[in-house]
Image (tube, rainbow, N blue to C red):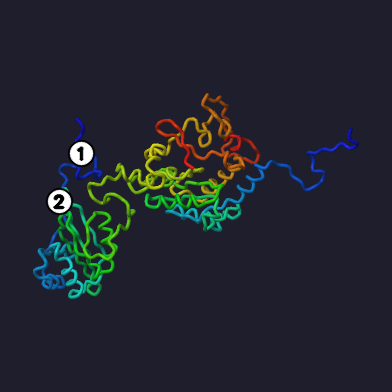
Amino acid sequence: MAQHQVNYASTAGLPIALTSVDKLVNWGRSNSLWPLTYGLACCAIEMMASGASRYDFDRMGTIFRASPRQADVMILAGTLSKKHSEFARRLYDQMTEPKWVISMGSCANTGGMFNTYATVQGVDRIIPVDIYLPGCAPRPETLQYAMMMLQKKIRKESADMKKNTKQDLTTQTGKRARLI
Amino acid sequence: MRKYVPKDNVQGKAYYTDRFWVAPRVPREAVEDGHFADVVKALGKLANDAYVEIGQLVVQIDATDNFAVMKMLKETCGYTQCSEQSAVDYLAKDNEFELFWQLLNITEAKRVRVVCRLANGAAIESVEPLFKSANFAEREMFDMFGIKVNNHPFLKRIIMPDDWEGHPLLKTYPLIGDEFASWYEVDKIFGKEYRDIIGPENRDPAKVDRYDTKRFSRVGYEVPFGADISEGETARDIEYSETALVNYNKKTSKQLDERR
């Protein structure tokens, strides 16, 4: 029998916090979301406004990065034309894991009012999307809310990205495929 | 019987047209005197027809004379700017294109439109040596109509991708529904075998996957994030706010976090 009973769960006055690895990693990931500086159309104006001093994304740890190698989040802000889709996908491929995608505005979500031969009818046809943000164009507050929702989503995820399923696509034949 | 759809013009049309409606025409005036009379005189036999529409001179020419007419207008008549150049599709009616060049004289503040008819499949001479702006305009005309331009320095598609099929401003080009166009990005990025995985274009923004609990939730049937509900879910009581303005700090109502 131990002479002194030790409560291992208490910090005993030491600067120690107990947590799980998942929570620690997700705390780090979700509080420094670095989006790619990548504007496609008029939604990018709202995205720039969100990053500028009035709405100030920096206070949330969200800093726009100029290189896909340093970015975690891709905000597809605006109409994606078919000619450009190849390059958008290449930028997405160049981003390092873990990475998330916000589809901002009606045009990125479904093609919006551009129901034509030259516009991608929803960016989720080529890039797996985490947050769909409606609006034409969404206000900066809405983009902030989308960022907060993404943070919330990341905090629920596993730190091991292999366990996280990205967007599932149901095919016409009923089988499910993954768009990585 | 299936409704007959003309193949030579697949553009969208108004679903109702007044049978007695007559399209208003711009009044044409004869060239009397002044600057425009000098222009017509300088062109001489090159001009097949010349008239004034809303203060602008319109000159009809042969397609083979376009470089000579432009050179004359630029060097003799002072039309130093080519502000616009393109074509109109009259293939269904006449098997011809109508090409036009819009020229501007800055000193006289006058505009001239040079118009010619070009048979389908024929090529036009480039006016790029005279007007540098014609470089991009002729490339756009080639891109949108497939009209070849002789002696152009760099005749290549300007708006559509280089490997695009078809010329979008032709009346025979559909706005939506072209197979090549609708699968373009999938074929290019993933390959043709991904077509049945990604599926056809779906523009329905209200598309809801019944069993997807990661992106959708139903009020009154809330389940944890990502839960499997293929066997059904249980109904939950809906809490309504009793005040118009909810103070979330006081937890008077249901919190968004619990609701998922």
Q: Residue B83: give x, y in percent of width and height.
A: 26, 65
- Dot 1 corresponds to which residue? B5
Numbered badge on residue A127: none
Q: Compared with residue A126, is residue A44 higher up or lower down, i.e. above or below?
A: below
Indicate the quadrant where residue A21 lies: top right
Numbered badge on residue B95: 2
- Measure how far apart labels 1 and 2 are at the Cα level: 19 Å
Q: In this view, does A173 lie to the left or right of A154?
A: left
Q: Check the residue under mark 2 and report the chain it is in.
A: B
- Amino acid type, mark 1: Val
Mark 1 neighbour density, 10 Å: few (under 14) some (14–19) many (20 or more): few
Q: Which of B122 and B228 is in front in this view?
A: B122
Indicate the quadrant where residue B135 lies: bottom left
Q: Compared with residue B249, is residue B72 higher up or lower down, i.e. above or below?
A: below
* Dot 1 or dot 2, earlier in sequence: 1
| Marks 1, 2 in one chain | yes
Quarter holding the C terminus of chain B is top right
- Amino acid type, mark 2: Asn
Q: Which of B88 and A57 is in front in this view?
A: B88
Q: What element carries label 1?
A: loop
Q: Is residue B217 left or right of residue B79?
A: right
